[in-house]
Amino acid sequence: MSLEPQTTSPHRMSTIVERVAAHPAIEQAVISAIRAQLPAVIEAVTRDLYGGQMVRMYVGKGADARRTMRNERILQLASLGYAHKVIGSQVGCSERTVFRVIADAQKAQRVNPEKLTQVDEGCQ
């Protein structure tokens, strides 16, 4: 019987770590710890960087990121052959917006124009 510790392969260890990290008890503990500490840490760092100064900060609404994701979804559905009206209802925008996004993408040569103009009969 050997008294030397057995080693675990890096892949197996990574799998174990990923599963442990995703465990609900760990997630809840991390979320609780962050919620408890984050405001104080933000305040301390802000005070260190800008103590005694008037600080104005713009916080965007995130519209650019949402628009980019919407446009990528429009292009994805168009490349699958969905009709413009269906795409608009799927992503929550007008048919005109779908036409504009596809036209802009074609101008930027981000997509194959032939693929976007094909319409699959089952998708209309």
Image (spheres, rainbow, N blue to C red):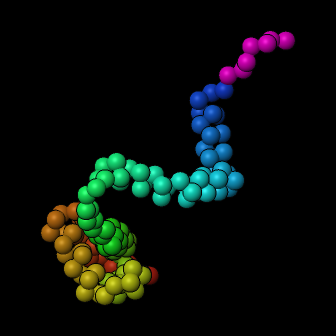
Which secondary structure is most common in the magenta stretch?
loop
- The residue range painted magenta reads 1-7
Which quadrant: the C terminus?
bottom left
Image quarter (top left, top right, bottom left or bottom right) of the N terminus: top right
Q: Nearer the viewer, residue 61 or 84?
A: 61
Can residue 27 be seen in the rendering of this structure? no
Whether the magenta-drawn stretch holds residue 2 is answered as: yes
Say above or below: 69 vs 120. Answer: above
Question: On the picture, is 89 further left or further right than 100?
Answer: right
Q: Quadrant of residue 12?
A: top right
> Depth check: 55 or 117 in front?
55
Q: Which residue is outermost to the left?
A: 107
Residue 75 in the image, given as x and y percentages of width and height: 31, 71
- The image shows residue 68, relative to residue 25, as above or below, that is below
Location of residue 33 in the rendering, given as x and y in whole percent from the top left corner: 59, 53
In the image: residue 7, left or right of residue 81? right
Using the rendered view, name the quadrant where residue 89 is placed.
bottom left
- The outermost residue toward the right is 1
User: Does residue 41 appear anywhere in the picture?
Assistant: yes
- Point 28% across, 55% down: residue: 52
Instruction: Specify whether 102 is left or right of 119.
Output: left
| Quarter of the rendering containing residue 73 | bottom left
User: Which residue in the rendered view is the most extreme toward the front?
Assistant: 52
Q: Nearer the viewer, residue 12 or 79?
A: 12
User: Residue placed at 28% from the left, 73% from the top?
Assistant: 116
- How many numbered discs, if any? 0
Q: Position of residue 88 (x, y in %)?
A: 35, 84
Does 75 appear above or below 24? Answer: below
Q: Is residue 98 magenta?
A: no
